[in-house]
Amino acid sequence: QLEYTPLDEIDRKIQRSVDYYHNRQRNLAQVRNPSKHDLQFRELQLKKLYYAVKDNEQEIVKALQADFHRSPLETIGLEYCKLVGDILNMLKGLKKWVKPEKVADNSPPFMFGKIVIEKASLGSVLVISPFNFPVMLGLTPVAGAIAGGNSVILKPSELTPCSARICEKIIREANLDENLVQIVQGAVPETTRLLECGKFSKIFYTGSPAVGSIVAEKAAKSLTPCVLELGGKSPVYITENFSNMKIETALKRIYFGKFGNAGQICVAPDYMLVHESKYEVVLQVAKKLLEEFWPGFNQNTDYTHMVNFKAYSNTVQKLKTTKGQVYTPNFAEPDEISLCIPPSVISNVDWADPLMMEENFGPVLPLIKYSNLDDALDNVIKYHDTPLVQYIFSDSKADIDHILTRVRSGDCLIGDTMMHVGINNAPFGGIGNSGYGSYGGVFSFKAFTHERIVFKQPFWMDFLLTMRYPPFTESKLKL
Ligand code: NAD
């Protein structure tokens, strides 16, 4: 059982976070070279965080195993390595990112002045994280907030209590500057308390679109800007001109994105749109790969389970009511006791199917047959516009361009799935229903700083600017 932070203690933590930020800025203002001092401080805190994460590698693996039977390999490959890589990348780039950028404007009012864009810290920021990659999606934004010079409160997901405790342990053991990073544990009442205080300078939320909208609404009351990293239905396309020779590799790549973490991944392929000329071969290879990847499927092996009964029954209900044909390795069935749902491919699905109503946050992959690409795209736009990502498998540049031109999405991959989340210094994020704002390396730094114009005007050239002063005479108008 996770111990939730009492509500009055949450108020005190918020105040401590805000006070910490202002006291630090006050102290910085008193040193001889504030920016150099500040850079060294941020780097030191990031290093401490980095080593605390490294020291807890096995604890993180165990926590995720306990929380939802996550396989150690998945935790190391998809969560742990990404987190330490992100912190290292920030340490590598920070010195360059914090430097004010010079701006050259050769028009008379500006040409003699000095213009820079300063990367100002924001203040105290709030990070709210989801359950599916609970350590990485909590601590990566925290690292971004530190890199940006802010104080931060992290609210991990209550659905993965062991991981939430590990986040707390890592922060404690990192021995960061006191009150730089604080943790609030809890569920809806605790998060609501945080959201309604109106004292944060930014809210970085990762989770479902429904809760994202609650977060944004509450933030709007105090004009607090948000980054919303949400989910949605990310489509896969296999178009008419895709070579049969590549279908097996394509499906392996699709399975990697779909069935990792038992489908509980925001960027998991949600459904497949397959051209009718490819449909039969895709289905045959899909069935074959189910058996090859999970021979004699056994829920006790390296396969992640659903996070809780609600998530389990939500997906099982869809499998029970779909009109499509469900295929699983070795005819495996969902198991209510262990909350395990075997990897499932569902053929003959249409747009009205229960599997096509909302995000499939589980190991289910519906296949929809299409005959005309434009009609298929009409339906993507009509039912599930602005997905977090779309995955195109096509050998036709015209088809790829057609999809990219018509369907807006957070990101897009051609010929693979999910790998884009690993790219350093690229802006990972959604659009429309899948959220707004982005992060990743320098984009995390940008998300947690404010670009401020600092313009210094000399006095000697005021004769060039006299036209802006009254009286506004005719002769000035002619200038
Ligand atoms: P969730 O929205 O249920 O919970 C996320 C966080 O919000 C948790 O910390 C939770 O305590 C808090 N929360 C829940 N209900 C709340 C409420 N009513 N008021 C205030 N706070 C509340 O999401 P989840 O189930 O943990 O995660 C799955 C979702 O997250 C999926 O939709 C997935 O696509 C999305 N996701 C997106 C990304 C991304 O980077 N875009 C990454 C991971 C997950």
Image (spheres, rainbow, N blue to C red):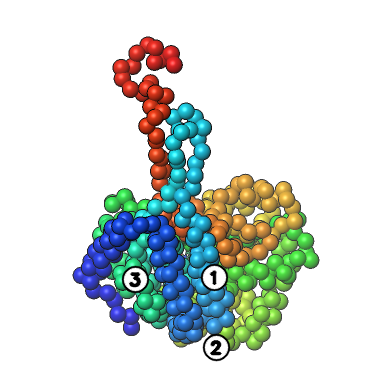
Of residues 309 and 416, which is closer to you in this image?
Answer: 416
Of residues 302 and 479, which is closer to you in this image?
Answer: 479
- Position of residue 300 relative to residue 188, above or below, is below
Place residue 274 in its image quadrant.
bottom right
- How many numbered circles are shown? 3
Amino acid of disc 1: Gly
Q: Are marks 1 and 3 in contact (CB under 8 Å)?
A: no
| Residue 414 visible somewhere in the drawing | yes
Mark 2 — residue?
300
Quarter of the picture holding the N terminus = bottom left
In-image side of 28 versus 328 (left or right): left
Residue positioned 30% across, 80% down in the render: 3
| Residue 307: image location, x then y, percent | 45, 77
User: Ligand 1 falls in which quarter?
Assistant: bottom left
Q: CA distance from mark 3 to mark 2?
A: 42 Å
Q: Earlier in the sequence, mark 2 or mark 1?
A: 1
Mark 3 — residue?
177
Mark 1 — residue?
85
- Position of residue 46 relative to residue 338, above or below, is above
